[in-house]
Image: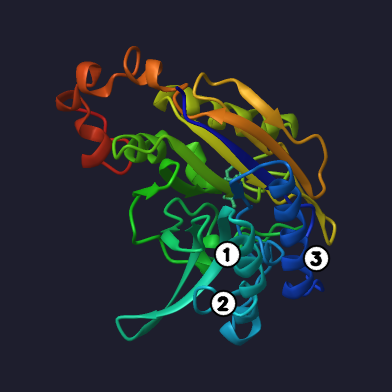
Amino acid sequence: MSRKEVFAVAQMGPVHLADSKQATVARLIEMLREAHARGARWVTFPELALTTFFPRYVYDDPADYDRFYEEGLPSPAMVPLFEVAKDLGVGFYLGYAEKVVEGGETRRFNTSVLVGPDGAILGKYRKIHLPGTKDPIGDPEFEHLEKRYFEVGNLGFPSFATPSGRFGMCICNDRRWPETFRTMALRGAEVFMLGYNTPTRNIHHPEPAHLREFHNRLSLESAAYQNGAWVMAAAKCGSEDGFAMIGGSAIVAPTGETAAKCMSEEDEVITVDCDLDLGAYIRRSVFDFARHRRPEHYGPITAQVGVEIPE
Ligand code: ING
């Protein structure tokens, strides 16, 4: 008897600077209700789901950008979503900008939270692979300043026990690094949930726009197959105040096949009735880690940061 569960990915269209968190959360609730109506028990929302992708702008004074962050979990803006989800018995992944006092200091992270169908907070993840720069590069159109507004995550890549199995979480640029998923898979994760906000134009290197979609799909499908896990990936996309971001939200099976994909750049819910045992044969054969991995030969992966040419 296979373990089947309906998962939803809730893609968001643009969130503009002028949009209130209340109006944005109302959109999340509407999509959660739609997912529930289709039988979903889990919903994955995007990265930084409550606000526009503010790291595209240059701010110097925290007083000018603190409004994008959430304090407390759930934060006041999140409470209506938490309440409806608990009432409907739907668990969810939510990406948000986290402001917290830890060790007597104010810390800021690009964070995701995993909430169970009973409303329990199952865990948090803080984005580790922060792309872009700390200081502006002077692009005439926009910047990518996640290293300016967030610290590197300090919670590692855990897996979380849920009523449906073990899940892992990551955020956006993390999906481009295979270390992300292998670490979570080695901790038993069989479902990966992630949100992303990916600008259509790469300000760090000119490249054809179609590569953004291709690299997104390549990252998701490789992660799924190479770890025998389901991947739930939710974009916030479309034109935010004129700044274009890619869609391509998807649910990818452990075989690496995309089982469902969003067709728009608007709020859109996709669902799949997932067989959570589908990846078992992959993890018992081609990617049977215990039988086939040879960590004694993987030294540079954790010993080095960049390339070191052997003498
Ligand atoms: N966005 C982009 C992402 O990794 C990026 C940044 C795009 C980096 C393309 C490199 C190449 O999808 C976030 N928020 O990480």
- Mark 1 nearby-residue class (10 Å; few <14, some 14–19, many ≥20): many
Q: Kindly identify which residue carries mark 2.
A: 75
Do we see residue 311 in this rendering?
A: no
Residue 224's place in the image compared with 287, above or below, is below
Q: Kindly identify which residue carries mark 3.
A: 16
The numbered mark, 3 or 2, whose residue comes first in the sequence reads 3
What is the x, y in percent for residue 30? Answer: 77, 58
In front here: 2 or 286? 2
What is the x, y in percent for residue 36? Answer: 69, 49
Q: Do labels 2 and 1 touch, CB within 8 Å?
A: yes
Q: Callout 3, which amino acid?
A: His
Determine which of the numbered discs, if any, sits on residue 231 in the image. Answer: none
- Quarter of the C terminus within the rendering: top left
Q: Callout 1, which amino acid?
A: Tyr
In front here: 269 or 215? 269
Q: Kindly identify which residue carries mark 1.
A: 96
